[in-house]
Every structure is written in structure tokens, then in C-alpha cells.
């Protein structure tokens, strides 16, 4: 995950030079590196309290970067995202507080040995709260509308970071907690694996249907991300070695592919001033390299 993030952030940083060059650019890059540091912290930390801290730091950076244009639409979308994100974080904090009150520890390693000794209701309540908390943060069904709007109004480099990096890290963190703290045997005994499977399947299906009706290329890619997240959740929910390998592979693969797609769309937008399919019609011969990169990314996403 750290290697993937290093690749994505490095390339997107270079890419940003052509987009963010004037005015308050120093604030943009400050927020950019703050986001980079906080998502690395999410991967490295072995403590649930620090996990919450890094989630909030990264979320604040994302809010500010989405609203970079400071248009009324961007500010409205950020407010919606903050509302959904705050609800999700509240669930995560509540679940962590219950675990701490019941087990007296926030260490992921330590909790792994204590969870089986806790009352059944504590196990069920806390994992359900984590599912809904992280589900809100990564735009699972039904709280997914904000993601397409955020992509539509965010600077293209930030859209790439959200879809290719930030969402993947949050999903990784959730499954790290689920498997490291609770363990597959407990999740299976509580039928949590089936709940995750249903969530993943519905998210993938509805995301695909919503993508079909869009006329904006960034919105199509946003709903495609929701669909791919659903596939990854389905793979992780099966609990076998092969399914975990498949889920991790697709998580890394999708991060690279979706980053490529958004960066290619950014070039198209910079040259035409729009991401509308109608206005982009016939743009391929004018921008062959960007169009080729988008085509390769689209094929990789479908294969």
C-alpha cells in the first residue's frame, strides 16, 4: 500500500504543477503533503486511536482540496461530504470507545486476543458500527451520491487521489481491523461475511447502473470507482486465501488504473474546458497520447 501511494502521490504531484501554479498554490501543496503523510500514518499505525486521528487529518485535507475552486457548487458538495464523513467518523469513534470500555486497550495486536472473550453483543455492535462508519467514508450504497459530485467539482489531481488512493486506504484499514482484530472465524460465525458480501454486491450493481446514465466523464469514473470498490469488498468477504489475494491485487490494480484514467481526463479537460461526453466528441485525433492512455486504462478496468 505504501509503495502504491508513493507512486500515485509522486506522479500526481508532478501532474499538479500544470494545474496549480498561481495564487495560493503553496496551500495546495501543504494540504497535498498533509494528506500524503496522514494516509501513510493510517497504514503504519497499530493503534485504533491513532487510526481515528489520521482519518480525521486526511479527511480535513480532502475537504479543503475538493473545495479548492471555491465555487458555490464545490462548497456545497464539500458540506455534503463533511456531513456524511462526520456521521461515518462518529460511528468509528463510537465503536472504538465501546471496545476500549470493554477491553481496556486500543492496540490492534492486543485487541485480537481480547475480542473472543468479550460479550457477543459487544462483538456484533462494534463490527456493525465499523461497517457503517467506513461504509459512509468510502461511499458504499446508499451514501454514495457525494462521491460523483465531489469528482465533478474537485481539481482533477484531487479526483485521482480520492479514487485511486484515499478510498483504497480506508478500505484497506477497515479490512485490516476486521481481519486482525475480529478474525475471519468470528466474522463468519456472526454472519458478517454475508453482510459484507451483500453490501459489496449491491454497491457494485447500483454503481454500474448509475454510471450508465451519466453524461460527464468524471462522474462516470466516480461511479465506476464505487462499482470496483464493491467488487473488492466481495472478494475480501469470501475469506479464503485466494479471495484475499484477488482482493488485494484488484485494490492495487484499480488504484493504478483509475489514477491513469483521471489524469488522462484532466488533460482532456484542460484542453477543452469540459468533461462532458458531448463536448469531448471527436477529441481523440487532437490529443492522441491522452486518448491512448485513457483507452488503455479503460480496457485494463474491464479485463
Image (cartoon, rainbow, N blue to C red):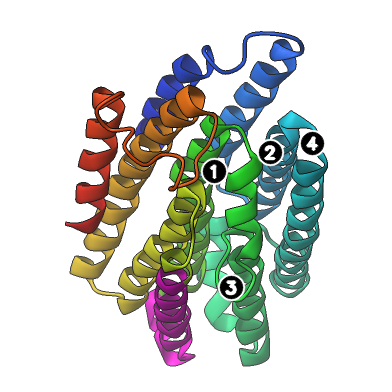
Are the residues at dot 3 and dot 1 in contact (C-beta closer than 8 Å)? Answer: no
In the rendered view, does 231 fall on the left or right side of 119?
Answer: left
Q: Residues within 10 Å of mark 4 (few under 14, many from 20)?
A: few
Are the residues at dot 2 and dot 1 in contact (C-beta closer than 8 Å)? Answer: yes
**Quadrant of the image occupied by residue 231:** bottom left
- How far apart are labels 2 and 4 at the CA level? 10 Å
Q: Position of residue 17 (x, y in %)?
A: 53, 12
Dot 3 or dot 2, earlier in sequence: 2
- How far apart are labels 4 and 1 at the CA level? 19 Å
- Give the residue number, with chain letter if any, for mark 3: 131
Q: Which residues are magenta?
A: 184-209
**Quadrant (top left/top right/bottom left/bottom right) for the C terminus:** bottom left
Secondary structure beneath dot 1 equals helix
Q: Nearer the viewer, mark 3 or mark 2?
A: 2
Residue 4 within the segment the image draws in magenta: no
- Give the residue number, with chain letter if any, for mark 1: 162
Image point 64% across, 53% down: which residue? Answer: 149
Q: Position of residue 83 (x, y in %)?
A: 80, 59
Q: Main secondary structure of the magenta part?
A: helix
- Give the residue number, with chain letter if any, for mark 2: 66
**Is 53 situated above or below 190?**
above
Q: Residues within 10 Å of mark 3 (few under 14, many from 20)?
A: many
Q: Nearer the viewer, mark 3 or mark 4?
A: 4
Q: Residues within 10 Å of mark 1 (few under 14, many from 20)?
A: many
Secondary structure beneath dot 4 equals loop
**Is 6 situated above or below 50?**
above
- How far apart are labels 3 and 4 at the CA level? 33 Å
Q: Which mark is residue 71?
A: 4
- How far apart are labels 2 and 1 at the CA level? 9 Å
Q: Which mark is residue 98?
A: none
Q: Nearer the viewer, mark 3 or mark 1?
A: 1
Amino acid at each position: 500500500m505504501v509503495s502504491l501511494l508513493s507512486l500515485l502521490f509522486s506522479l500526481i504531484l508532478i501532474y499538479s504543477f500544470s494545474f496549480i501554479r498561481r495564487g495560493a498554490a503553496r496551500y495546495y501543496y501543504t494540504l497535498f503533503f498533509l494528506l500524503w503523510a496522514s494516509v501513510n500514518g493510517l497504514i503504519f499505525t497499530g493503534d485504533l486511536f491513532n487510526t481515528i486521528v489520521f482519518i480525521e487529518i486526511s479527511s480535513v485535507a480532502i475537504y479543503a482540496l475538493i473545495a479548492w475552486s471555491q465555487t458555490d457548487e464545490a462548497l456545497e458538495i464539500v458540506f455534503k461530504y463533511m456531513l456524511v464523513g462526520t456521521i461515518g467518523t462518529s460511528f468509528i469513534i463510537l465503536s472504538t470507545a465501546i471496545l476500549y470500555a470493554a477491553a481496556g486497550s486500543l492496540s490492534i495486536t492486543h485487541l485480537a486476543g481480547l475480542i473472543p472473550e468479550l460479550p457477543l453483543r459487544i462483538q456484533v455492535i462494534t463490527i456493525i458500527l465499523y461497517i457503517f462508519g467506513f461504509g459512509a467514508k468510502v461511499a458504499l450504497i446508499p451514501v454514495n451520491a457525494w462521491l460523483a459530485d465531489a469528482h465533478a467539482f474537485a481539481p482533477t489531481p484531487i479526483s485521482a487521489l480520492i479514487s485511486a488512493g484515499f478510498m483504497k486506504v480506508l478500505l484497506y484499514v477497515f479490512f485490516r481491523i476486521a481481519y486482525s482484530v475480529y478474525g475471519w472465524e468470528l466474522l463468519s460465525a456472526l454472519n458478517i461475511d454475508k453482510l459484507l458480501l451483500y453490501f459489496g454486491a449491491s454497491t457494485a450493481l447500483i454503481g454500474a447502473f448509475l454510471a450508465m446514465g451519466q453524461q460527464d466523464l468524471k462522474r462516470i469514473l466516480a461511479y465506476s470507482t464505487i462499482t470496483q470498490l464493491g467488487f473488492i469488498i466481495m472478494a475480501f468477504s469470501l475469506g479464503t486465501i485466494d479471495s484475499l489475494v484477488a482482493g488485494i491485487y484488484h485494490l492495487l490494480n484499480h488504484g493504478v488504473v483509475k489514477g491513469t484514467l483521471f489524469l488522462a481526463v484532466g488533460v482532456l479537460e484542460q484542453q477543452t474546458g469540459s468533461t462532458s461526453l458531448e463536448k469531448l466528441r471527436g477529441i481523440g485525433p487532437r490529443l492522441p497520447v491522452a486518448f491512448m492512455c485513457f483507452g488503455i486504462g479503460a480496457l485494463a478496468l474491464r479485463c
